Amino acid sequence: SAAVGWMNGPSRDAEATGFPGLALVGMLVGFGCAIVVAFKPTLARILGPIYALAQGFFLGVISKAYENFQSGIVIQAIGATLGVFLVMLVLYRTQVIRVTSKFRSVIMMATFGLMIFYAISFVIRLIAGADSVSFLYEPSLLGIGFSIFAAGLAAMNLALDFDFIERGSKEGLPKGMEWFAALGLVITLVWLYLELLRLLSKLQQR
């Protein structure tokens, strides 16, 4: 699905107009699946693969748009995402990062707050135009700092995913919950990739 999204993404000669409209299809379908599964985890077995296909298409379109104007950035973002994933896994397994109740609460509250901010910003951009929340995309120190914070928060969420999988295994959660755990991990990786893609784009523009 990512390959299909890439092939249907904006061409290199297309005018840069911000968020590719075609990507909305995959984003909205994926978002809908994630919301439903959050309230009904048992549906992850069905909606998880649908989410993966929808988000794959979304990432393909977005990645093509970035690659058109910053050649090589997609490979860098994929490599950075895999690198962060492996580092976080090692830090978690060696207990350098311990997921305590306080750690979990802080990361979850920060993530919830960031998601609300992104939702409000998205609505503002639709109403007031692409330049209305410009610092999110500008290569300023504020913009880069924000992207570093968001990418770091996404990385910390990987630790929460690892912890949920480990605790679920020890507590003997129903086997079907493995789909829910896997979907949570995929959602975090998609988020992390997008944040790193945005961060690398800003750094290349400096």
Image (cartoon, helix red, strand yellow):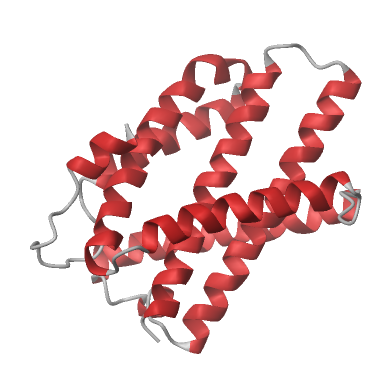
In x, y percent, where is residue 105? 80, 53
- Residue drawn at (34%, 63%) of the image: 72
Task: Please give left or right for residue 83 compared with residue 15 in the image.
Answer: right
Task: Please give left or right for residue 192 compared with residue 31 in the image.
Answer: right
Residue that extends furthest to the top in the rendered view of this protein: 175
- Residue drawn at (46%, 22%) of the image: 49
For the question of whether residue 115 can be seen, the reply is: no
Task: Please give left or right for residue 142 compared with residue 121 in the image.
Answer: right
In x, y percent, where is residue 37? 56, 26
| Image quadrant where residue 145 sits | bottom right
| Image quadrant where residue 102 sits | bottom right
Instruction: Please state, as top left, top right, bottom left or bottom right, where the C terminus lies in the image.
Output: bottom left
In x, y percent, where is residue 25? 27, 39
Task: Please give left or right for residue 203 compared with residue 170 in the image.
Answer: left
For the question of whether residue 148 can be seen, the reply is: yes
- The relative height of residue 173 versus residue 97 in the rendered view (above or below) is above
Camera-side residue of 2 and 48: 2
- The relative height of residue 21 versus residue 41 in the rendered view (above or below) is below
Instruction: Please state, as top left, top right, bottom left or bottom right, where the N terminus lies in the image.
Output: top left
- Residue drawn at (62%, 37%) of the image: 185
In x, y percent, where is residue 163? 81, 39
- Residue drawn at (48%, 52%) of the image: 78
Q: How many numbered tags mark residues here?
A: 0
